[in-house]
Image (tube, coloured by chain):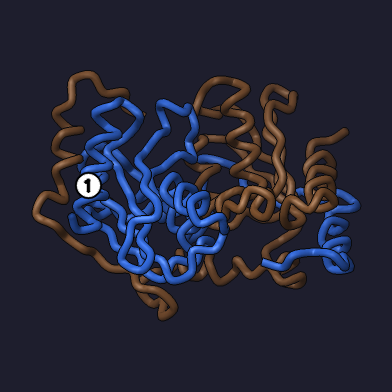
Chain colours: A blue, B brown
Amino acid sequence: MEFMKLAIEEAKKGMAKGDGGPFGAVIVKDGKVIGVGHNMVLVNKDPTAHAEVTAIRDACKNVDNFDLSGCQLYTSCYPCPMCMGAALWSRVDAIYYGATSEDAASIGFGDHEFHDFLKDPKTDEKRKLEQFKVDNYMEPFQIWAKKDDKTPY
Amino acid sequence: MEFMKLAIEEAKKGMAKGDGGPFGAVIVKDGKVIGVGHNMVLVNKDPTAHAEVTAIRDACKNVDNFDLSGCQLYTSCYPCPMCMGAALWSRVDAIYYGATSEDAASIGFGDHEFHDFLKDPKTDEKRKLEQFKVDNYMEPFQIWAKKDDKTPY
């Protein structure tokens, strides 16, 4: 089955099980599926368990690496900012999506607002976003910069 | 100890253990810490295991709910787009950060580029971002819209 169809089937499967919203994703490497995931927000009681994050984690576990360079992400819907960020960190080289953010909004999933927030976080009135400096706020970075045995990534 | 100090200590602890980069976070509710996390990208081989995501997951597990309304996130560094998205989905009402994105860039963590990507995803030349429609791409949403026993969230 083609990869986007698999993402759609995964979305349907997860929803039928009651695991979460109607979203599915697969990760592909060299023409083979190496990771699969659907939304598990409700069953895991975890707001970060979106289909893309779940699929990325599954793929990373399967390849035993945090780096998915050379892989492609197929997701049933345009990624929310969290999932887009996860895809960037995973280093997939392509993100293919089925439905759009507008399609998702039409059934009540309004992550459109989150995309707007990321474009201009300072203007948000619903929540505070503030720098809060303590005297040693740079200490972790100073230690990291001098660390001899670190693994850069 | 004040909450930002705790986030800094968590960052130092995680880095000393070799778990990942120098980042820590705590979630606070009613003046009490209900979740703690540090970057675990290296130890978990998981690109999504940032401090904020780890702390949000820990808090959700502890309160047995995916909704952290009324909670505050203290993070040692300005959240990357993935973590900002995770914070929005978790519904915390405040995000307090220590170091800035520029501070992080000064030690080699360039998620500045990711913030830029989220502001204008279509312009990226490093990876593809394309709609890929299959004939039933709207089917999961159509099923969800008609589903009687769903839990909206």
**What is the secondary structure assignment of the residue under circle 1?**
helix
Query: What residue sits 25% from the left and 35% below the top?
Result: A13
B135 left or right of B88?
A: left
User: Which residue is most to the left?
Assistant: B135
Instruction: Give residue B76's position: percent from left, percent from top.
Output: 75, 50
Q: Is residue A122 visible?
A: no
B18 left or right of B142?
A: right
Local crowd size for mark 1, using a 10 Å CA cut-off: few (<14), some (14–19), many (≥20)? many
> In the rendered view, would you say B3 is above or below A76?
above
Query: What residue sits 67% from the left and 34% below the top?
Result: B27
Q: Amino acid at mark 1?
A: Ile
Query: What residue sits 35% from the left and 64% below the top?
Result: A95
Instruction: Give residue B72's position: percent from left, percent from top.
Output: 65, 35
Residue tagged 1: A8
B152 left or right of B103?
A: left
Instruction: Give residue A25's position: percent from left, percent from top.
Output: 33, 50
Q: Is residue B42 visible?
A: yes
Output the chain of dot 1.
A
B71 left or right of B98?
A: left
Give the number of callouts: 1
Instruction: Give residue A134's position: percent from left, percent from top.
Output: 85, 49
Image quarter where the N terminus of chain B lies is top right
